[in-house]
Amino acid sequence: MISVENLTHTFGAKTLFKEVSLQFTPGNCYGLIGANGSGKSTFLKILSGELEISKGNVSIENKKRLSFLRQDHYEFDEFTVMQTVLMGHKKLYELFKEKEALEAKSNMSDEDGMRLSEIYGEFGELGGYEAESDAGAMLEGLGISTDLHNAVMKNLEGGEKVRVLLAQALFGNPDILLLDEPTNHLDIESIKWLEEFLGNFENTVIVVSHDRHFLNQVCTHIADIDYGQIKVYVGNYDFWYEASQMAATQRQQEGKQREQKIAQLQEFIRRFSSNVAKAKQATSRKKLIEKLTVDELPSSSRKFPYVEFKPERECGKNILTIKDLRFKVDDEITLDNFNLNINAGEKIAFIGYNNNIKTALFDIIAEIKKPISGTFEWGVTIKHSYMPRDNAEFFNTDDNLIVWLSKFLNTQDDTFVRSCLGRMLFSGEEAQKPSNVLSGGEKQRCMISRSMLSGANVLILDEPTNHLDLESITALNKGLIKFQEVVLFGSHDHEFLNTVANRIVEFTPNGVIDRNVGFEEYLADAEIAAKRDSMYKGHKRLEL
């Protein structure tokens, strides 16, 4: 168990936490959420002991082992993959090295022999004799093949290093596991493996992630950083979000139909009480949720953008026809004779082993780049809006946001432009910010606002959730679900893909798979899985 007592921590002039007290108990997985800059990663560093706190106390039960997913990709460059993973259990690794050194001695003293005998006993108690096979199985589960287990870390690609560091954090059954964005650089199969691992993990987990599907799958509790406090709620992210929205509405309508609202909340709690992340904890978690009262439900100070796409007209029968398209990615012919016909109402997720293929296709149909050969034709009723993955060129100006957005709207009505920016959380002085000093998330919100106001009936969105916080991702997700026309998009967000797409187009090293199904149905279909296996043979699998 981790206990936090009267924690206060400042960063410069900003107070991140003020007199925070809470406990994290074994058997639970806590999703740590909060707005960008609220201190999520800082809090994990405080718990791990890497960061000294300004005031208060953090205590861990005696002899409990804590493991922290490290973000330094170069720290272990001189070690092999296997050594790096074994280092996750510091005591075991120290015994392993001492055992090796003693066994290598040609003239062993009696004292050395006695010490070696002690090491054998301790080594066995800590599972040392199975350590390398356990580490190997973990690496394979995370997509690191056997031929890389003895490779030197500096020779691995960035994504592979991240997976090895994750295996290091998970290795040896730590009592407390701290994970900061663990799904970054993982493919679908590896994320599923991690979800199953954490689902069966019986100790304490505290995880920061922007992946809502992952949080929903693994979390039993949500630890919400808000108002300089950290409050823990029972349930996964969806439960926290829906409850916080309903609670906020209830509090705004205090005294108005109170009994009816309480009944709605109670029904909501009953409905969610059966939605558990860990089967072993179903009974205890259900009891906890059923004991919740209206006043205990979360109420957040964080604001969600308002996202709604309103087309000027509906799409006609003909949307987009692509014939025999041929184009290059990274100076190689990637797609040859690519054909696609898009129909009204389709929301197509373009996925695959190389994100640049999808980006190249989007650039071509948005008429930014030209193909080597082939044609594409938009229907006469179509107006499209493109939100590219790299938006830097849109912000090479010191115009403030009012001027910036006005250029795309062809209007000088400041009041209207300000109201549009306000919907995306740029109100008051925020609307006067120079556009070239915006953060990645702020730029993305500006680009969403531009698309919202385009009147387009076809939206082309290349990685639209990049740099966004959970609140903005959730708002954009809901806006696209509501949109009745055509969406062509790529994303790394599982929940986003699953709730928006009704058709999947996957680019593989050996051709294209095109199916009129949702994302999870696509992944679960045995026929599609077999086809994917054959088309990825000898190549990297789907990167998401």
Image (tube, helix red, strand yellow):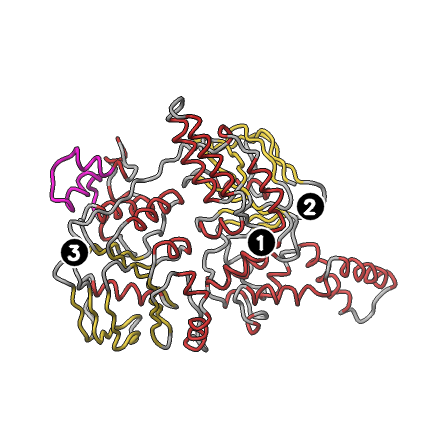
- Where does residue 175 sit, x and y in percent of width and height? 66, 48
104 lies above or below 469: below
Assign the C terminus to one quadrant of the image.
bottom left
**Circle 1: is it few (<14), some (14-19), or many (20+) Cα within 10 Å?**
many
Which amino acid type is shown beneath numbered disc 2? Lys
- Where does residue 119 sit, x and y in percent of width and height? 79, 60
Which amino acid type is shown beneath numbered disc 3? Lys
Q: Please say whether residue 45 is one of the residues in the magenta stretch.
A: no
408 lies above or below 532: above
Give whichever of 86, 498 is nearer the camera: 498
Return the mark for residue 198.
1
Return the mark for residue 68.
none
Which amino acid type is shown beneath numbered disc 1? Leu
| Majority secondary structure in the magenta region | helix
**Circle 3: is it few (<14), some (14-19), or many (20+) Cα within 10 Å?**
some
Residue annotated with mark 3: 383
Give whichever of 223, 158 is nearer the camera: 223
Residue stretch in magenta: 397-421
Residue annotated with mark 2: 64
Contact flag, marks 1 and 2 (Cβ < 8 Å): no
Task: Please identify the quarter of the rendering in which residue 53 is found.
Answer: top right
Contact flag, marks 1 and 3 (Cβ < 8 Å): no
In the image, 192: left or right of 324? right
User: Of the residues tagged 3 and 2, which is closer to the observer?
Assistant: 3
Question: Sequence order check: which comes first, mark 1 or mark 3?
Answer: 1
Separation of disc 1 and disc 2 at Cα? 18 Å
Separation of disc 3 and disc 2 at Cα? 60 Å
Assign the N terminus to one quadrant of the image.
top right
User: Of the residues tagged 1 and 2, which is closer to the observer?
Assistant: 1
